[in-house]
Image: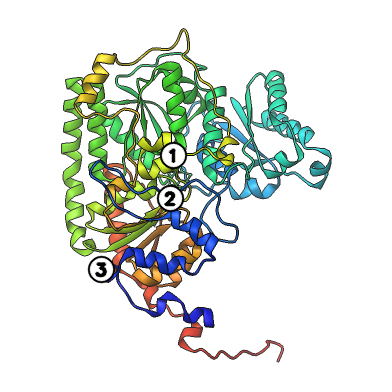
Amino acid sequence: MAEAAKDLSTEKVTLDNLDPEEVKARIMAKYPPKVARKRSKQFVINKVGEDGKTPVINANVRTVPGLMGQRGCCYAGCKGVVLGPTRDIINITHGPIGCGFYSWLTRRNQTDPESTPDGHNFMTYCFSTDMQDEEIIFGGEKKLKQAIQEAYDNFKPKAIAVFSTCPVGLIGDDVHSVCREMKEKLGINVFGFSCEGYKGVSQSAGHHIANNGIFKHVVGLDDTIKEGKYRINLLGEYNIGGDAFEIERIFDKCGITQVATYSGNSSIDAFANSHTADLNCIMCHRSINYVAEMMETKFGVPWIKVNFIGAHATAKSLRKIAQYFGEQELIDKVEEVIAEELPEVEAACAEVRPRTEGKRAMLFVGGSRAHHYQELFGELGMKTLSAGYEFGHRDDYEGRKVLPDIKVDADSRNIEELTIEKDPERFNPRISEERKAELEKAGFAFNDYDGMMPEMPDGAMVIDDLSQWETDQLIKIFKPDLFCAGIKEKYTVQKHGIPLKQLHSYDYGGPYAGFKGAINFYHEIDRMVNSRVWEYMKAPWDKNPELAATYACD
Ligand code: CFM
């Protein structure tokens, strides 16, 4: 009780009369000094300099043991995030059944299989080697071979991928040699990932490993240049709640051809052919920038950052793509589509905005959405008091300009950096140096991402790898109108009487991307911040502190 008495919730305060530095100091005061020192560097009060320079934030470092964080594991980032949404690769989890089961159909990444005989969709199945004690002791390679054979015999897929879980690394199974052997035997593409859960400080390591694997084993296998004008890839869009479908709809309308999406609504054939596109558009920079970099080095495909979360961000991204191609026909078409789509969005926004204006949100999600969704809240007139990533790196916060200053620590060194060279035959710079310089002079940014912090107001609290204690305190101190995070946080936050919007799975909603998605989001947020049902719920012990019970047998 002595601890509880010191709880910051006893004081009712709002942001407007609080100094964020003071709030930070009070939250940190609870931690032992060593922990407080570490967390202080990850809990930063924003201040944007004239040149877009922000304070340094410590990110992509180990979570302090004992602190309840939001992060996932390396296996989750590789198998669940990057490769999971590809429908026609059989993804076998090599490990205990729990790893496969709990990463099965939990991410709401949708797909639309082709109605051709080889238009497989394996996402509805959960494949695992179901490792037992016997394999842990005597090795699991034999069982893995059997599993690959069985999957092949039953489904005849185009490709099989194997994902290593923690015990695989610990006992030393060589998944790569098993994959090579089975590839030869079966005559299909079989490849493995050393993405053991512990191999990194978060799922971010798994993204990198997935990018490397897909680039090594799949990209570039099919050189056919398929039909279509303005051929692009959309990178880092995973079709959660149908986002990619809405973006595809807009691209189709504009006459932009999507060669591949990494990896929402994707197929292995599209990956194999993706190096033939003329531009890579990166939506989620954190999870997929490695593929874009490698594709540019090897094949000459340039990349730009885009964002389709927010109606105005969508319009801006479409204009950026049109400007890159520079053809009047596309520029006009894009303007026509924007002019056609925006009025409906703006009308929806205008209707909702009087009820959402000035409401205060907090967002703690992954490695890109905590930034992107601030666009939509801005459109609703809402204020983001505090935001942070679970596993973003410094460049996701401060912008890619800080890349040379990021210290490579032992945990990052653990992850392979592929050495990529220009492909002697297939490298083809998509635009000339002169044209590139001309575009850059006009303010067009290639290979760049400004990060979250330069776009946030001064005084906002930017917090990396938020802990449960900090969540509780932020909520008690600020009583925000909305908290955005994931399923692990949802119910504890709602017990404080604050609505929580899941920005990972979208609860049961979506799409929220593009124009139609923005409308969905406005309505959803209006409903959530204006029907604060959770506030009315009182726990039985709050209403009546003395509970009495009897045994049923009495
Ligand atoms: Fe990229 Fe993602 Fe995200 Fe991410 Fe994720 Fe996700 Fe996310 Mo959950 S790839 S970093 S690892 S945008 S699963 S679709 S919502 S944490 S902010």
Picture layout, residue 355 above or below residue 205: below
Locate residue 138, reporting x and y percent: 84, 39
- Residue found at x 21% / y 61%: 357
Q: Residue at x 65, y 90 (%)?
A: 550
Report whether 137 appears left or right of 2. right
The residue carrying mark 1 is 286
Instruction: Identify the image quadrant of the C terminus.
Output: bottom right
* Amino acid identity at mark 1: Arg
Q: Could you tell me which secondary element the residue under label 2 belongs to?
A: loop
Residue type at mark 2 is: Tyr
CA–CA distance in space, label 3 to label 2: 24 Å
Q: Which mark is residue 389?
A: 2
Residue nearer the viewer, 140 or 125: 140
Considering only vertical position in the picture, is 114 above or below 492?
Answer: above
Q: Are marks 2 and 1 in contact (CB under 8 Å)?
A: yes
The residue tagged with tag 3: helix, strand or loop?
Answer: helix
Residue 440 placement: quadrant: top left
Between discs 2 and 1, the one toward the N terminus: 1
Q: Which one is in front, 131 or 171? A: 171
Report whether the residue tagged 2 is closer than 8 Å to ligand 1.
yes
- Asked if disc 3 and disc 1 are in contact, CB closer than 8 Å, the reply is no
Q: Which residue is mark 3?
A: 16
State which image quarter holds ligand 1. Answer: top left
CA–CA distance between discs 2 and 1? 10 Å
Q: Residue at x 40, y 14 (%)?
A: 225
